[in-house]
Image (tube, rainbow, N blue to C red):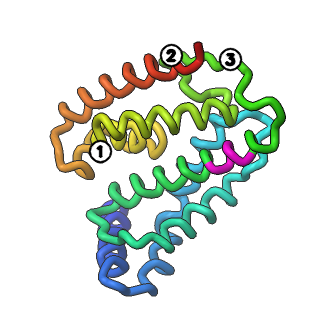
Amino acid sequence: MQNIVSRQISHLLVAWSKGNEFALEQLMPLVYEELHQMARRYMRQQSSGHTLQTTEMIHETYLKIAKSEDRNWQNRAHFFGVAAKAMRQILVDYARSKHSQKRGGWQERITFTEDDLVSNGRSEEIVALDDALNQLAVLDERKSRVVEMKFFAGLNVEEISEVLKTSPETVKRDWRFARTWLLRELSAQSE
């Protein structure tokens, strides 16, 4: 059953990339539950005072994807990688908005550990992680994308290697490097 749905998703993505707007309407019910799981994963990392709701994040993600100019979908995994990037940007925008409402700026010291880069989900941590990922993307775009797909979208090594058209071993190496680099970078930012 899962293979049939996966093929149907891929078929609709191809149709949508060729200009069939109705394909997006058919696609969303098929991907909604997985988008919901991704959004829940993001929201669990947020602080208890976070006011952005899971459903709101899914709808914002849908709007970002629907408005996207780049519709050259490779497959299901590629779509969810793009969705993860959209969700990350929604959280960053939300965090920046919350920060702009606070007085005093980024005065608080931020501590990062390997196991828990953004477990508190504070806006400062989300923005710091986004900045670090953007810096990593300048150095190595693929490593940055591996982090997005693994950490944010929850894709496994095989799915990431499929999206990036590289070997699973390369994905594992990229993940190890990126995780270490991010930890070092985020720790340096917090000092």
Disc 1 versus disc 3: nearer the observer: 3
Q: Are marks 1 and 3 in contact (CB under 8 Å)?
A: no
| Residue at 56% in and 18% down | 112
The spot of residue 27 in percent (x, y) is 45, 74
| Upstream in sequence: badge 1 or badge 3 | 3
Q: Which residues are magenta?
A: 93-97
Disc 1 versus disc 2: nearer the observer: 2
| Upstream in sequence: badge 1 or badge 2 | 1
Q: Amino acid at mark 3?
A: Arg
Residue placed under numbered mark 3 in the picture: 109
Pick the quarter of the image with the C terminus.
top right
* Dot label at residue 127: none
Q: Secondary structure at mark 2?
A: helix
The secondary structure that dominates the magenta segment is helix
Q: Would residue 77 be found to the left or right of residue 104 on screen?
A: left
**In front of the other: 32 or 42:** 42
Q: Are marks 2 and 3 in contact (CB under 8 Å)?
A: no
Q: CA distance from mark 1 to mark 2?
A: 28 Å
| Residue at 17% in and 43% down | 166
Residue 35 against residue 30 in the figure, above or below: above
| Upstream in sequence: badge 2 or badge 3 | 3
User: Is residue 145 magenta-colored?
Assistant: no
Mark 3 burial class by Cα count in 10 Å: few <14, some 14-19, many 20+: few
Q: Secondary structure at mark 3?
A: loop
Residue placed under numbered mark 1 in the picture: 160
Residue 21 against residue 181 in the figure, above or below: below
Residue placed under numbered mark 2 in the picture: 188
Q: Would residue 80 be found to the left or right of residue 93 on screen?
A: left
Q: Amino acid at mark 2?
A: Ala
User: In which image quadrant can residue 125 be found?
Assistant: top right
